[in-house]
Amino acid sequence: MITATNLTKVYNGTSVLNIGHLEIPTGQIFGLVGNNGAGKTTFFSLLLDLIQSTTGCIFNNEITVGQSEAWKPFTSSFIDESFLIGYLKPEEYFYFIGDLRNQNKADVDAFLANFGDFFHDEILGKGKYLRDLSKGNQKKVGIVAALIGNPKVVILDEPFANLDPTTQIGFKKIIKELTENGDTTFLISSHDLIHITGVCERIVVMDKGVLVKDIITSEATLQELEAYFSGAHFLED
Amino acid sequence: MFKRLISLEWKAFIRSASAGKSIGLKILMVFLGLYFTLAFLLIGIGLYPLLQEYFPGEEPLYIVNRFMLLWLFAELSYRFFLQTLPVLDIKPLLILPIRKRKVVNFVLLKSLASFFNFLPLLIIVPFGIFNIYKNEFPVSSILAWMIAMIGLTLSVNFANFIIKKRFTDNLKALIPVVLIIAILALLEYFKSFEISFWFGKGLNEILTYPFLAIIPVLLFLFLYKWNRKDLENKFYLDATLNKGEKSADTKEFLWTRRFGELAPYLQLDLKLIWRNKRPKTAIYMSLLLLGYGLIFYTQDTYQDMPGFFVFVGIFMTGIFMMNFGQFVPAWDASYYPLIMSQNIPMDKYLNAKAGLITFSVVVLAILSTPYVYFGWRIFALNLVCAVYNIGINIPLLLYVGSFNKKRIDLDKSPFMNYQGTGIAQWLVGIPLMAIPVFLFWIFYKLISYEAGMAFLFILGVMGLLLRNQAIDFIAQVYKRKKYAMIEGFKQKDN
């Protein structure tokens, strides 16, 4: 589904991303882990054509991102609060996104009905604007909006941050359900090793813009990651 | 502490994304500044001899006092439109050990450094010196008069803030003020109670009893304290937030459905305008400035200069276009990455904006129909100007928008972010108005009034016919500048 080749991004002579080759097959739940400055958000921004790569390119379903916009109809994302429109109420925001993805109001309503528990009665029908919601609730809205309209590629940057524990667990369940039929590719980044190993089939570790580990998730993955981040490797530096 | 705040301000200024950009605009501002400085200085120096010549036998100082109230009113009006309110981002300061009063004082004192406070000094000081030199009054009287004048100028400065704030916060609160002014103006007009005359008399008293100069100074201090109290009460993060929660607007603008695939964008834009102070002010402004024609149509001087009528026509039918259109796409700055990564084709996005602005021009043109009272020629010209706005000026503004990389923060309304109208905003309007005025004027001089109208009309219609091509071209420009725009809109400055 997604292929990156020779992808680099250089800011003022400092290389912040350098990926030789990365391939993410269709239907995979792909996790990206790394400390601050590892290049996770840079990679996602390149994937969404929000910044320009210095060299190389990304193919999203064989469409070259940056040259064509044909990837937009089947790709959705939530990176940060700049993906929310503050002066809309949550419902209106969902309907707007729905409109852009050819879902009418009834479709969106039916879709939202699945998220009653997830929203915990704090989001729909409150008559509040998005800008007046708490950070956690804003995040919920952004994540759910990114799932509207059966996108083939969903990109979520740090979806677990700011969520309360109940919602974190609920969210993992939702991702599992959505990927059951295997045609939605998820790209998720996180600092939370437990959650990401719990939900992702494959985990890639980045450090200073370079891919350092590529693991198919198993029982041992969490320990391996904990060992990597707590230890030996960073002390050597 | 003040030193620190000043250094913060300075850093915010030089490190912001927009610093160094729009240099052309800055040069123009400097040029205008120099021009007005010179003009005011010349008036200041020439006022005394001029008054002596035109009002022989009368004391120039008394005449100045006689017209002072009218001048103060004029000053308040132009400040209202041109002077921006001082802004400071308070959030990071809230938790630091700085006393609120210090920050508020800083913001208010910062406003004293405004160019608008400097201009009147250029008249007051030379005129005062002239009076001292002529020796009609004791030096102490003249000094007291000068202090009183400075006090009045500063009072206007702070009165403007209060009015401007009320204007954006709550329009209804202004009604009594407008009523009182209207009544006083009528009484003045019918000469039953000439407030400006009595105000002048009062000022004359200062010359006899210099200590009375304390009154304007007290007025200034009172207005300052009023502002300070106002701001201190707003010194909370949720000061602006609470109100929004109570009145989440339920208007859905469902009627936009009939515009098919542009509907979601139109709805979004209407909500943008309706739910945010700054664009909402643009609407009130447009309605208010519809009255602009009265100033020109009633004057005999302009009857032989129809170029002015073109200016008025473009201005009245296009005021919303200028106020709103020049900040496309910056209105969407806070969620521009969403717009860029969602399934939104650029040409549809631009077409929706163009459609909305076109709608505003049509509405304003309809609202300006009562001007038919001043003759069919004026009425027809206004319609032609509307067509020109729709055909030429809208694509032009959208194109110019691609150069705009400065974020507009709708969400977090920074401390006193009531800006909305400042000089820079009006300057952008100059080419939009000057070009049609010039084109009309050429045809008017060479052929006739009707030929000028016809030419503008043809230009407008041609622009309308080529709208799709123009939008396609502009969409290409937006796509090319996309990355720079996303980057620029990310930068928050106050």
Image (tube, coloured by chain):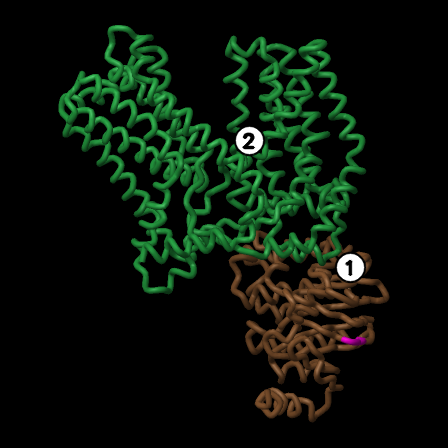
Chain colours: A brown, B green
Mark 2 is surrounded, within 10 Å at the Cα level, by few (under 14), some (14 to 19) or many (20 or more) other residues, namely many
Q: Position of residue B491 (x, y in %)?
A: 56, 56
Is the N terminus of chain B in the top left, top right, bottom left or bottom right quadrant?
bottom left
Name the residue rendered at 58%, 12% in the picture: B305
Left or right: where does residue B451 sit relative to residue A230? right
Magenta highlight: main SS: strand
Badge number at residue A66: 1
As for residue A237 lying within the magenta part, the answer is: no
Query: Are labels 2 and 1 on one chain?
Result: no
Q: Position of residue A39 (x, y in %)?
A: 66, 73
The secondary structure type at the circle numbered 2 is: helix
Instruction: Give above or below for A232 relative to B166.
Output: below
- Closer to the camera in the image, B87 or A70: B87
Q: Is residue A129 visible?
A: yes
Badge number at residue A13: none
From which residue to which does the magenta span run?
A20-24
Task: Specify the quadrant of the image occupied by residue A199.
Answer: bottom right
Name the residue rendered at 25%, 9% in the picture: B58
Q: Residue furthest top?
A: B56
Q: Calculate the distance from the C-alpha at mark 2 to the C-alpha at mark 1.
A: 40 Å
Instruction: Give above or below for A192 relative to B176.
Output: below
Task: Specify the quadrant of the image occupied by residue B133.
Answer: top left
Q: Position of residue B315 (x, y in %)?
A: 59, 26
As for residue A22 lying within the magenta part, the answer is: yes
Left or right: where does residue A84 sit relative to residue B66? right
The secondary structure type at the circle numbered 1 is: loop
Which of the chains bears the disc numbered 1?
A
Mark 1 is surrounded, within 10 Å at the Cα level, by few (under 14), some (14 to 19) or many (20 or more) other residues, namely some
- Name which residue type carries label 1: Gly
- Name which residue type carries label 2: Ser
Q: Which residue is mark 2?
A: B286
Which of the chains bears the disc numbered 2?
B
